[in-house]
Amino acid sequence: MTRRRTGRAQAWAELLRVSALFSVPGDALAGAAAAGARPGRGTLCAIGASLCLYEAGMALNDWADRTEDAAERPHRPLPSGRITPSAALTASAALTTAGLALASRAGRPALAVATALATTVWAYDLGLKHTPAGPATMATARALDLLLGATASTSGDSAAHRRAAHALPSAALLGAHTYAVTAVSRHETQGGSTRTPLAALAVTLTVAGVASGAASGAVPGVASGAVSGGLTGRRSGSPAAVSPSGGPAPAPRPRPTLPTRLPLSSRRPPSRGLGSLLALAYARTPATLLLHAALNPSAALTERAVGGGIRATIPLQAALAARAGAPGTALALLGLVPAARALARKVSPT
């Protein structure tokens, strides 16, 4: 009986790709950091909702692909008979409901984003996965997941919509990475593509460069001219004032020209060195595997490259958090990498 229960638990772990779960909480945490919010109750609700919706997508994915998997991957839980299709579909529906319920605890805006996310996940698995729109749909889902964290973490704020909008650049970078990984994953059962891994490598390096540059840039939302004017007490480029006697006039009283209320993310300086290091760690994780898959486009090496891309999501989330001025969150996320790597040895993330 114990062995039977262990085998069933293993089957569900494979179906739900539990080793990839470590890549999910960072979406909400990076979103909260980008919105200038400290993690709180709303962030926890977003993490719970994200985990449920992610797992719902995993179960629904195998249910939709059960015929294809029977020919290409008969060892998967559904074609091998270890889990029935009806059980997988029921689990997906239940997890979706639970995810939306958790999101609703963070407020109506968070529920609206979670509903869009759930709709995107179901549309991808049931119809768009095998179309040219597949990678873009998955990228949209991951970007929405980060925005869910930003929205939930700023619930109750009178300027919540403006603060959540600060997370859009981070969502775009995460979406670009997800697009590249998804494009490569379309070849993981048969291989044969050299161009796709090379394109994914180019996207990875670009995302890393942008994340690193943002991490070492100026404080966001503040123009250099405004800073100059605020420090000198006059508009940049205006002539110096003179007194009626011809001598220099007394220095005018400085008048600050900065906004009276900057978002929290704009008030915190970015973590420059840490952000650059994390961006480098992100690029390094899948780069070698993608290069190997390009040079030898076999199914095995392509699948390894996809797994590396999934694991690279965590250091990318950490780099985005550091870029937003949340080094504590970044370091906490980086601590998930060893656990994700260890569990991936037992349960494949793909």
Image (cartoon, grey):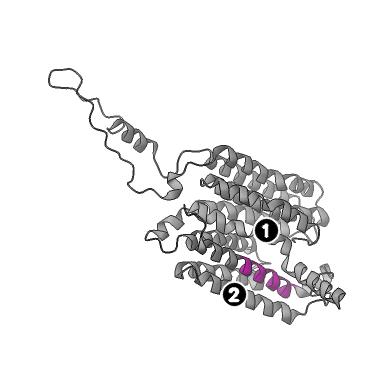
Whether residue 298 is visible to the viewer of this picture, yes or no, is no
> From the viewer's perspective, is 281 left or right of 294?
left
**Residue where numbered disc 2 is placed:** 98
| In this picture, residue 114 sits left or right of residue 3 | left
Q: Give the residue displayed 53% in from the left and 42% down from the top.
A: 214
Can you identify the residue that label 1 sits on? 22
Position of residue 89 measured from the top left corner of the image (x, y, whole percent)? 69, 78
Distance from disc 1 to disc 2, alpha carbons, whole Å, reads 19 Å
Q: Position of residue 165 (x, y in %)?
A: 45, 56
In the figure, residue 141 lies in which quadrant?
Answer: bottom right
Q: Is residue 135 magenta?
A: no
Q: What type is the residue that disc 2 sits on?
A: Ala
- Furthest residue to the bottom? 86
Most extreme residue toward the front, as rendered?
Answer: 2
**Residue 54: within the magenta?**
yes
> Magenta stretch?
51-65
Image quadrant in which the C terminus is located: bottom right
Crowding near the residue tagged with mark 1, few <14, some 14–19, many ≥20 C-alpha atoms within 10 Å: many
Q: Of 168 and 323, which appears nearest the observer?
A: 323
